[in-house]
């Protein structure tokens, strides 16, 4: 049993974040993490909580993202393991020095950028998340101009680190984000 619940994660994030788009991103990553937890037979709510909190220091420290996670979460009683997991999603990208090793860490690293592409694609579709296919998402993924700020190399590296096919990662991301479609306003 993990102490970090989704409700607690939401409560903590509200203390450090005000920008609506960051809450939408938190909901997207949380949903994707829940689907990956189910895939790996892990604690869905705990992984969702990790996903919800992953950018806890981003608004206050955008240039030093992942470097202030510990100081924000330790006083909240978040475990060392969970703090390390959250920091690890910035490995090789933000100066974070914790390499993703566990399935939870690798999943967070993999879906952070991918949720951006899924979200951008959903916004283009009249039916939003409903019925989104991996095949159509892959076409958007291959178009480097589409959601250009989302780093495809990081997404592919994340899938590779998980030992997961990119298509399966996309399928799980779509599934989890569809479950959170109301929070994503999709």
Image: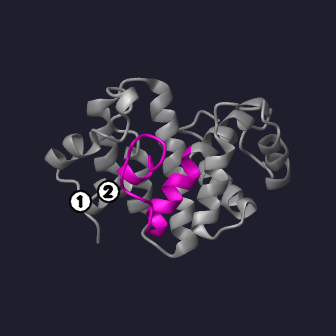
Q: Callout 1: 10 Å neighbours few (<14), some, many (20+)? A: few
Which residues are drawn in magenta?
Answer: 87-112
In this rendering, the count of numbered labels is 2
Relative to 42, 153 lies left or right: right
Q: Determine contact: label 1, label 2, CB under 8 Å.
A: yes
Q: Which residue is mark 2?
A: 84
Mark seen at residue 91: none
Task: Give whichever of 83, 118 is nearer the camera.
Answer: 83
Residue 104 located within the stretch drawn in magenta:
yes
47 sits to left or right of 8: right
User: Can you say which quadrant of the picture contains the N terminus?
Assistant: bottom left
* Relative image position of residue 128 (x, y in whole percent): 73, 37
Q: Secondary structure at mark 2?
A: helix
The percent coordinates of residue 27 (x first, y second) are 50, 42
Question: Viewed as shown, does residue 97 lie left or right of 179?
Answer: left
Q: Position of residue 9 (x, y in %)?
A: 32, 47
Q: Identify the image quadrant of residue 16.
A: top left
Assign the C terminus to one quadrant of the image. top right
The residues bearing labels 1 and 2 have C-alpha atoms spaced at a distance of 6 Å
Write down the residue under mark 1.
Answer: 80
Q: Position of residue 49 (x, y in %)?
A: 38, 53
Label 2: how many residues lie within 10 Å, few (<14), some (14-19) or many (20+)? some
| Residue at 38 percent of width and 47 percent of height | 96
């Amino acid at each position: 049993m993990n102490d970090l619940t989704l409700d607690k994660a939401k409560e903590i994030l509200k203390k450090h974040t005000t920008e609506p788009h960051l809450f939408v991103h938190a909901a997207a990553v949380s949903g994707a993490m829940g689907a990956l937890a189910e895939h790996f037979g892990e604690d869905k709510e705990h992984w969702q909580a990790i996903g919800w909190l992953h950018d806890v220091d981003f608004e206050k420290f955008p240039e030093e993202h992942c470097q202030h996670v510990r100081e924000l979460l330790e006083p909240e009683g978040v475990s060392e393991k969970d703090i390390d997991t959250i920091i690890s999603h910035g490995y090789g990208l933000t100066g974070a020095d914790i390499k993703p090793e566990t399935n939870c860490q690798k999943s967070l690293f993999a879906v952070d950028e991918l949720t951006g592409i899924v979200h951008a694609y959903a916004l283009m579709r009249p039916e939003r998340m409903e019925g989104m296919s991996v095949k159509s998402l892959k076409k958007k993924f291959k178009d480097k101009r589409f959601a250009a700020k989302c780093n495809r190399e990081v997404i592919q590296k994340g899938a590779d680190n998980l030992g997961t096919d990119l298509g399966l990662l996309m399928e799980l991301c779509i599934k989890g984000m569809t479950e959170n479609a109301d929070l994503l306003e999709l």
